[in-house]
Image: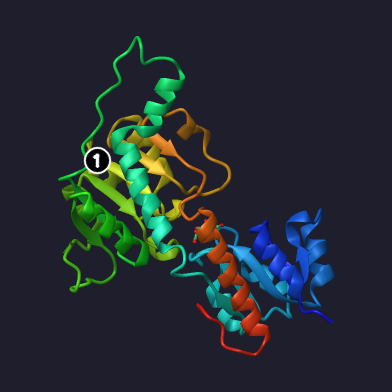
Amino acid sequence: MSVEIIVTDPVEPALMRQLEDTFAIRRLWEAEDRDAFLREHASHARGLVTRSMVGADAAMMDALPKLEIISVFGVGTDAVDLEAARKRGITVTNTPGVLTEDTADYGMALLLALARKIAEGDRFVRAGRWPGEAFPNSVRVNGKKLGIVGLGRIGSGVARRAEAFGMEIFYSGPTEKPDRPYGYIPDVTALAEMVDFLILTCPGGPDTKGLVDQAVLKSLGAQGMLVNIARASVVDEAALLDALRDNTIKAAALDVFADEPHVPEAFLKLDNVLLTPHIASKTAETRGDIGDLVYRNIKAHFAGSEVLSRVV
Ligand code: 8YV
């Protein structure tokens, strides 16, 4: 009999096909009654595939006592209760590395789009406003200072790109990386104070929750711009809304939201915020690579081999 795997929500069709060819797949998102679905599969389900924004909490793990592995489609594991998994001896894998470059490209793209008013320019032309109106000046990127919150894989990718755009780079994070040619400013408020752009590339979770608060936004200042490709939880949302409304900061670009795919109505009313639907890693190539790694982790586990990218 095939090993039973629960998939919590829709993933790439190619991954779905690979999984279906090898395992007995149960689709949680199609269930009318989630608890009844979990009860029905409790005595068989040995694997769980979940997106990084969905994850799995301790209650889900309790509901599936035969669970051996949670394979996360994405690098962020902040939505998985890692401690609960550890206690229950459940393996957790993620997909580091394969999405770094595209996500860093996208971070740089959002920064450029925000500063240079690319989305606004598109809307302006489509609305037929060009003939009668002057488009507002945008903001120069080259020669400006960039603060990177979290100089991990993705943050480092952003730094390399920003260097090529002639930016001066500073970063914060739990540890200094002396091998990097960038200024380490551990305190995020101090970092915000000295830069023109602040980009968030750190992990989500309790350690970074609300890191960008009212004080940080105030320090970023009226000419400062914020880009978030990390997690919505890193930013105090109410403080950000206030800062955008009263021009405490100039503008923000957000690819991540607390209750995705729902975006707070208040953001939609603001002109100085650029909103995208969590697509930093969403190229055909990277999504294919993420899917492959998810599959190879699950396959390795059930073949009795060590998984490729273990978190727990
Ligand atoms: C993915 C992400 O878009 O890797 C992550 O942690 O947030 C993104 O790359 C997401 O996992 C897909 O649902």
Point out residue 88 in the picture as x, y percentages from the top left corner: 63, 82
Q: Splitting the image into 4 quarters, where does residue 171 fall?
A: bottom left
Point out residue 284 in the picture as x, y percentages from the top left corner: 54, 55
Above or below residue 70? Residue 210 is above
Q: Is residue 157 left or right of residue 261?
A: left
Q: Do we see residue 150 in this rendering?
A: no
**Farthest residue toward the bottom?**
304
Above or below residue 189? Residue 52 is below
Going 80% across and 79% down the picture, which residue do you hit? 2
Q: Are there few (<14), some (14-19), or many (20+) residues within 10 Å of tag 1? A: many
Q: Nearer the viewer, residue 186 or 177?
A: 177
**Farthest residue toward the front?**
285
**Farthest residue toward the top?**
132
Q: How many marks?
A: 1
Point out residue 111 in the picture as x, y percentages from the top left corner: 32, 44
Q: Splitting the image into 4 quarters, where does residue 21 fall?
A: bottom right
Q: Do we see residue 307 in this rendering?
A: yes
* Residue to which mark 1 is pinned: 224
Going 56% across and 83% down the picture, which residue do you hit? 307
Above or below residue 56? Residue 143 is above
Point out residue 302 in the picture as x, y percentages from the top left corner: 68, 84
Going 21% across and 55% down the picture, which residue do you hit? 163
Q: Nearer the viewer, residue 30 or 285?
A: 285
Q: Amino acid at mark 1?
A: Gly
Q: Secondary structure at mark 1?
A: loop
Going 31% across and 57% down the picture, which residue do you hit? 158
| Quadrant containing the N terminus in the rendered view | bottom right
